[in-house]
Image (cartoon, grey):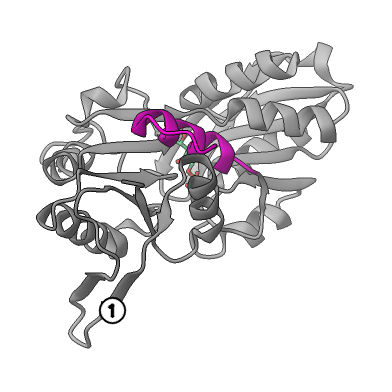
Amino acid sequence: MTPVVFAFPGHTGLMRQLQAETGAIAGTLVLHRFPDGESYVRLDTPVAGREAVFVCSLADPDAKLLPLLFAVAAAKDLRAVRAGIVAPYLAYMRQDARFKPGEAISSATVGRLVSGIADWLVTVDPHLHRHASLDAVYAIPSRVVQAAPAIATWIAANVTKPLLVGPDAESGQWVAQVASAANAPCIVLDKTRRGDRDVTVSMPSTERFRDRTPVLVDDIVSTAHTMIAAIVDLRRAGFAAPVCIGVHALFADHAYAELQAAGAARIVTCNTVPHASNAIDVDAAIAAEVGALLGRKAV
Ligand code: R5P
């Protein structure tokens, strides 16, 4: 039987891409929030005997995780062959250790919750810093789509003489991949974070790159203060206004406006979280990975 794809709000484009890739039918998902804050979920398309795919990017995760898990659990109760999650942005990956006594390691708890209900997971560039792979956090089969090739293609088409800049050590892995694919040099700054919005960075020697356009690349832009601190340092060092590229456009509160005001030449993100800055399309790469996981390619 053909698979069925259920998309949470904001993911029509990715749902169509998944349908084109796998031949899946579009499922109807009914979501409702009761006045007391509880969630109601109903699958209005039969799933018995089908692979069920649930598309839900997990920005603002506390509001979305429970309805998503209710939907996946319903599909399994209703005898779907398997029920999997496509979460282009996977939340709760940064608190992956106990930095202060008594802290909850939320990535581990969310990993256990999701792995206890869903059969598989596909995501884009999860924040893996202290873990080598998603398998350290998720017990179910998972596949990771890398945004680096699409970002490198965008840079090659839009930026002359780029210098890739990672604002902190954690961004080093993405920046190195993008730089190699874009055939451009890269540097990584050293970040100190004292609070949510209290961030400073320091820079290695950059004299020989001064004639290049700095392109900041980070996986997540949340308060944007990491990028803002990097812009301040790059401008102080005599660079042109940087292009800022984030994989996941979280942009908490007024972060987008603050990043614009800080002097970004351009702000561009991948479409893993719907946002006005989305300019780099990773839907086709996600759909290809899901198609491979389901063993299906539409003809
Ligand atoms: C952290 O290591 C991540 O890679 C990002 O640098 C961080 O999440 C960005 O957060 P913000 O935009 O709040 O500075």
Residue at 54%, 24% (x, y): give it.
Answer: 174
Res 119 visible? yes
Residue type at mark 1: give it.
His
Q: Quadrant of residue 16?
A: bottom right
Residue at 55%, 47% (x, y): give it.
Answer: 17
Q: Residues within 10 Å of mark 1 (few under 14, many from 20)?
A: few
Q: Quadrant of residue 66?
A: bottom left
Q: Which residue is mark 1?
A: 32
The picture places residue 261, in percent across and down from the top left corner, at: 72, 57
Res 237 visible? no
User: What segment is highlighted magenta in the picture?
Assistant: 281-299
Q: Nearer the viewer, residue 192 or 60?
A: 60
Residue at 64%, 36% (x, y): give it.
Answer: 230
The picture places residue 122, in percent across and down from the top left corner, at: 37, 37
The picture places residue 47, in percent across and down from the top left corner, at: 24, 56
Secondary structure of the residue carrying tag 1 is strand
Q: Nearer the viewer, residue 123 or 169?
A: 123
In the displayed structure, 183 sits above or below 79; it is above
